[in-house]
Image (cartoon, rainbow, N blue to C red):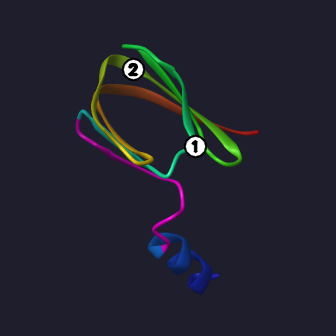
Amino acid sequence: MLVRNLYNFLDPSSFHIDIYDNKIHICNYKRIISLGSSKIIIKTNDKKVSLIGNNFSLNKLADNEILIIGNLESLEIKDE
């Protein structure tokens, strides 16, 4: 179990979200389904991630990596 968790942490191709004060960093997503100032929906390989908040803006967009600025109120992850 510990080895699998460590591998998932170190795997640079796996989907992950880092949440900071007024910033959300997302790596290795498949596509952006919806982008608005209060709700953003992201598709991964097998999940749909909904971010709900306010004052969202896309600060950085690179190959499968985005940085969202804004106030996150809730995060919902659903299996697809």
Residue 74: x, y in percent? 47, 28
Quadrant where the N terminus lies? bottom right
Question: For numbered disc 2, what is the local secondary structure?
Answer: strand
Question: For numbered disc 1, what is the local secondary structure?
Answer: loop
Which one is earlier in the sequence, the residue at label 2 or at label 1? 1
Left or right, 72 with respect to 16, comes to: left
Residue 20: x, y in percent? 27, 44
Residue 30: x, y in percent? 57, 43
Question: On the image, numbered disc 2 is attached to which residue?
Answer: 53
Residue 32: x, y in percent? 52, 30
Q: Nearer the viewer, residue 15 or 62?
A: 62
34 shown above or below 76: above
Q: The residue under label 1 is which amino acid type? A: Lys
* Residue at screen point 54% across, 62% down: 14
Dot 1 crowding, Cα within 10 Å, few <14, some 14–19, many 20+? some
* Residue at screen point 67% across, 48% down: 45
Quadrant where the C terminus lies? top right
* Residue 36 quadrant: top left
Number of the label disc, if any, that sits on residue 30:
1
* Residue at screen point 53% across, 55% down: 15
Query: Which region is colored magenta?
Result: 11-21
Left or right, 61 with respect to 32, comes to: left
Q: How many marks?
A: 2
